[in-house]
Image (spheres, grey):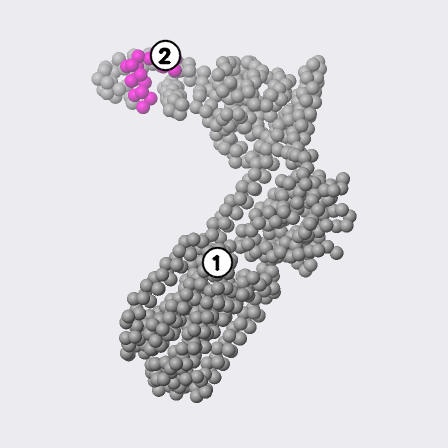
Amino acid sequence: MGSETPLVYIVDDDPSVRESLDSLLRSVGLAVLVFETGQAFLDAERADVPSCLILDVRLPGSSGLEFQRQLASSELAPPIVFITAHGDVPMSVAAMKAGAVEFLTKPFRDQDLLDAVQRAVRLDRDARAEAAVTAGLRDRFAMLTPREREILALVTDGRMNKQIAGDLKLSEVTVKVHRAQVMQKLQANSLADLVRIADRLAGATRRHKAADTKA
Amino acid sequence: MWLGHTVKVDRAERVSTETADRSQVRRAVLLLAGLLVVLLMVAPIARQPLSGTEPLLPAYAAAIFVSEMVTVALLLALFGVQRSWALLALAGGYLFSGLTVIPWAFTFPDVFPGWAVGDGLQTTASIAAFRRLGFPLFVLAYALLRDRPPVHGSASWPIAGVIAGVTGVALGATGLIIVGDDVLPRFMTDKRNVAAVWFVVPPATIVLYACGLGLLLRRPLSVLDLWLVVVLCTLLIELVLLSYVSAGLRLGVGWWVGRACGLLSATIMLLVLLLETTSLYARLARSVAAERRGRNNRITTMEVLSASIAHEVKQPLASMVTNADAGLRWLAKEPPRSDEAKAALGRIVRDGHRASRVIESVRAMYTKGSQERVAVDLNARIEEVVEAYESEFRLSGISVETDLEPMLPLVLGNPAQLHQVACNLIDNAVEAMRPVAGRRRLLRATSRRRSDGEVVVSIEDTGTGLDPAHGEDIFEPFFTTKPDGMGMGLMFCRSVVEAHGGRLWASANIPHGAVLTFSLPEAGEEG
């Protein structure tokens, strides 16, 4: 996963800016894809590699900030590095608050841009790794039977086998069997491990729901 | 020498200069019609005496006195602003009328019984005659002085003179009347009834009223003129009631109704002045708001313009820098990628040309149509701009003089740009005078033809003046001494004037302020 060539998307309506950025980023060994509009970027098929987005604040149609908001609601949006020829402070504050990695005013130093891109790519790589782990967990969670899910919830709530047996009107032995199944299916080695996994699953679900309501 | 003439530009909307509109004329006519109806209704019972009404008389006199004195104060305040001799004369009239009503009431028989002074039989009637004949003379003076040019210099001396003069005459004359009762004409046969001699006074007064009305109606009526006509008509009705309808009988029904007319006439001017001041204030407030909006718009336009120029220039500059960085990186590779470096250099060339085109287009925006020159009458331009700034001048308390040389030669130029130059120079002058207090704020626009074939226009102000330390800096872009200025005004003016083959320079005004002058070649000559 770490050996994949990072991909940089550029969205800028000015062709000379696109071309110069394309050349600069390729000269340091990055893969580049350029788009004239935000919509063209959204419509394009995105490769599953660590990436980042260089975005001009002033875009025809919607502004770069507007586009940033739009993008934030979609899953695994690449981190954004803003560039602008306007350099106005309130705008950069708004962009940074909304989670931009960097806000550069044109003309900028190439090293500043490359640093920002590297930082953004690293963030994206981490996010992707995290997402991959969560996705694996979710697959494993999907293999649990409804009864096993019930027992998982009670176990992670800190209840003893005997109490669970009482709650669900099962024998303690049955609970133990289910519990062993859960541990095995989720590849948990200890109770602490199991709690961590459950937490992670709950967190991912929350994020998922939040993204859904935003969209 | 050239033949010059001075035009006083004084276009502010004022109660004394603004022409009365239809609705005001209608109101005036309705009021007079109503009074005529009252006159006719009172006529049959006019001679019925109303005994015991003497105590009302001091109250009546006090009401007249107060309202006329307030009118005097308002008229003098108006004179302080407008410096019109006519207003001063009218203020004198009201002062005279207000001052003479007091001895008239004091000497009225049986009003202040037991007072030793002024109980001669003829005293009251003589004072009344003096007062009645005197007031229309002031109105005549007002009507005749309307066209006189305004007072120059301080307003305090004329005001003091009029107050002293009128007070002296009014008090002196009434004093003589009180003392010399024996030698006065026999107006009264007893305390209530007039003698035949009295009937000389009303016709004489009517003649004076008629003269006043005739003079006032000679030309379109201003608001003040209109209500002064109403005042004279009301006084006329009062006179008819007092002298003819009630046949001179004092303290009868007709007499009191006539006195009510007198009170009405004394308050009309007061009410008109108050109403007009209030509505004038509302209009001023509105135009201040409009002016502020306009100013904000201008500033915003400049901000937007400069921001968009910056953006347009930065865009190709940014690509050039990035391309150069990329080229260096391609060349630093092992082995160097000269194909990529070459492409980057090619893009730098292209972007350089693009940046240059952006600058060129900005220049073209300013000099747009500069090749297309037409004959421009600078005098007309100046008058146009001065007129456009009228409300600005009024709000800032600035008087304006234009001193334009007649038969000024035309210049060849772009009318819109030259108009803008005049606007910017006047803007600067107004701004410079805003902080000035304690001396006259005067803006003078002059135009002259010079023997070397140039036309010279100056805008003088009495503002804060130029700081010698700034020197030629004031013509630099983004130089400004104004807290909210953009510093583009004078730079623009100079570039326009120079593009027209002229010059623009600044000098000090004596004793205060600055003069900005530009010269342009006459249209007849080439160059």
Q: Which residue is mark 1?
A: B221
Identify the mark at residue B256; answer none if there is no mark.
Answer: none
Instruction: Inspect the magenta stretch and tell me whether residue A149 lies in it.
Output: yes
Q: Quadrant of residue A57?
A: top right
As drawn, which residue projects farthest toward the right? B452
Q: Depth check: B367 or B162 in front? A: B162
Badge 1 sits on which subunit?
B
Q: Depth check: B423 or B508 in front? A: B423
Q: State the extent of the magenta-drawn residues as a range.
A: A138-157
Observer-side mark, 2 or 1, equals 1
Mark 2 to mark 1: distance in Å?
A: 104 Å
Q: Is residue A107 visible?
A: no
Instruction: Inspect the magenta stretch and tell me whether residue B209 lies in it.
Output: no
**Other residues around mark 1 within 10 Å, as few (<14) / some (14–19) / many (≥20):** many
Q: Is residue B238 visible?
A: yes
Q: Position of residue A62 (x, y in %)?
A: 49, 26
**Other residues around mark 2 within 10 Å, as few (<14) / some (14–19) / many (≥20):** some
Q: Which residue is mark 2?
A: A185
Badge 2 sits on which subunit?
A
Q: Quadrant of residue A58?
A: top right
Q: Amino acid at mark 2?
A: Lys
Which element is circle 1 on?
loop
The residue drawn where x is 45% and y is 60% is: B226
Q: Position of residue B315 (x, y in %)?
A: 62, 28
Pick the quarter of the image with the C terminus of chain A.
top left
**Whether residue A41 is situated above or below residue B121 in the rendered picture:** above
The residue drawn where x is 29% and y is 66% is: B41
* Residues indicated by labels 2 and 1 sit on the same polypeptide chain: no
**Whether residue A52 is situated above or below residue B207 in the rendered picture:** above
The residue drawn where x is 36% and y is 80% is: B194
